[in-house]
Image (cartoon, rainbow, N blue to C red):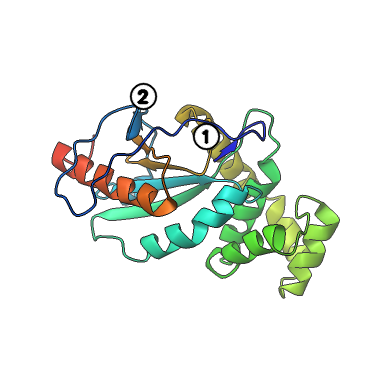
Amino acid sequence: MRAWRGIPAAVLATLCLAFGAGAVELKPDRDFRVINPPLATDTNNTNKIEVTEFFWYGCPHCFDFEPVLAAWAKKLPADVSFRRVPAIGPNNKWTPGARLYYTLEAMNLLEKLHADVFAAIHVDRQRLDDEKILLEWVAKKGIEPKKFGETWSSPGVQSRVQQARELSQSAGLSGVPAVVVQGRYQAMTQGSYEELVAMVDALVARVRAEGGKR
C-alpha cells in the first residue's frame, strides 16, 4: 500500500476470512474502516451498490493490484457498479496522474489505455508526469497531441480533478490502493490482493443486508 508521503502505510488490519467456511462476521478496524460521513456516490448509479477504487498510476502496489481488480470488475453482479478515482494527496504530487486519467476518460480512451499507462510507468520506466515525455507517449499511441493538450487543459477535466481531490480528502485515505463500498466502508486486509477483493464482496453483501442505499 502506497502512503501519501511515499512510505508504506500500516492501515490494513489482519483479515480472518475462512474461505468456503460460510458466513464471516465482519469487524470494524479489522476487516473494514467506517467512513463517516459517507462519501457521495455516483448519481448515475443510484440503484446500485457502488464500489470505488482510489489509486495512483505511480503506485507499484496499484500496478500489482490492477489485474486482480480488473478481473473482479468483469464479473460484477447486476446490483453492483464500479468506478475508479485517481487519488490526490495533500501535497498534490499525484495531480498529473489524475489529469491524465480524466483526459483519457474525456477522449473515450480510458478502457483502451488505462493498463498501458501503468505499463509505461512501471515496466518501461517512463516519467509520464513530465509533459514532454507524456506528449511523446501520447503520440506513439496514435493520439493527436494538440487534441490531447486541449482536453488536458479543458474546464471539464479540471473540474473532475477537483472532484477527485475533494473525494480523496473526504475519504480520509492513508494511502492507495484503497477500495470503498457504497461510500461507507473501506475494505481492509494484510493478506493478498485476492483476499482484498474477497473482503470487498463481503462488504457488498453487508450493504445488501442493510438495504443497499443509505
Residue 167 percent coordinates (x, y): 49, 34
Quarter of the image where the C terminus is located: top left
**Can I make out residue 52 in this image?**
yes
Q: Earlier in the sequence, mark 1 or mark 2?
A: 2
The reply, left or right, for residue 43 in relation to residue 12 is left
Q: Is residue 90 above or below residue 112?
A: above
The reply, left or right, for residue 40 in relation to residue 123 is left
Q: Say which residue appears at 56% left-offset and 66% top-offset.
A: 108
Residue 17 percent coordinates (x, y): 27, 44
Q: Say which residue appears at 52% left-offset and 67% top-offset.
A: 111
The reply, left or right, for residue 25 in relation to residue 179 is left
The mark found on residue 55 in the picture is none
Residue 12 percent coordinates (x, y): 44, 34
Tell me the distance, in whole angstroms, between the alpha carbons under discs 1 and 2: 13 Å
Q: Say which residue appears at 14% left-offset and 49% top-offset.
A: 22
In the orientation shown, which residue stands out farthest toward the right? 132
Q: State the residue position of label 2.
A: 37
For disc 2, the neighbor class at 10 Å (few under 14, some 14 to 19, many from 20) is few
Q: Amino acid at mark 1?
A: Ser
Q: Secondary structure at mark 2?
A: loop
Q: Secondary structure at mark 1?
A: helix
Q: Is residue 73 above or below residue 24?
A: below
The mark found on residue 168 in the picture is 1
Residue 49 percent coordinates (x, y): 28, 47
Q: Amino acid at mark 2?
A: Pro
Front position in the image: 155 or 214: 214
**Can I make out residue 184 in this image?**
no
Number of numbered markers: 2
Front position in the image: 32 or 208: 32
Q: Quarter of the image holding residue 121?
A: bottom right
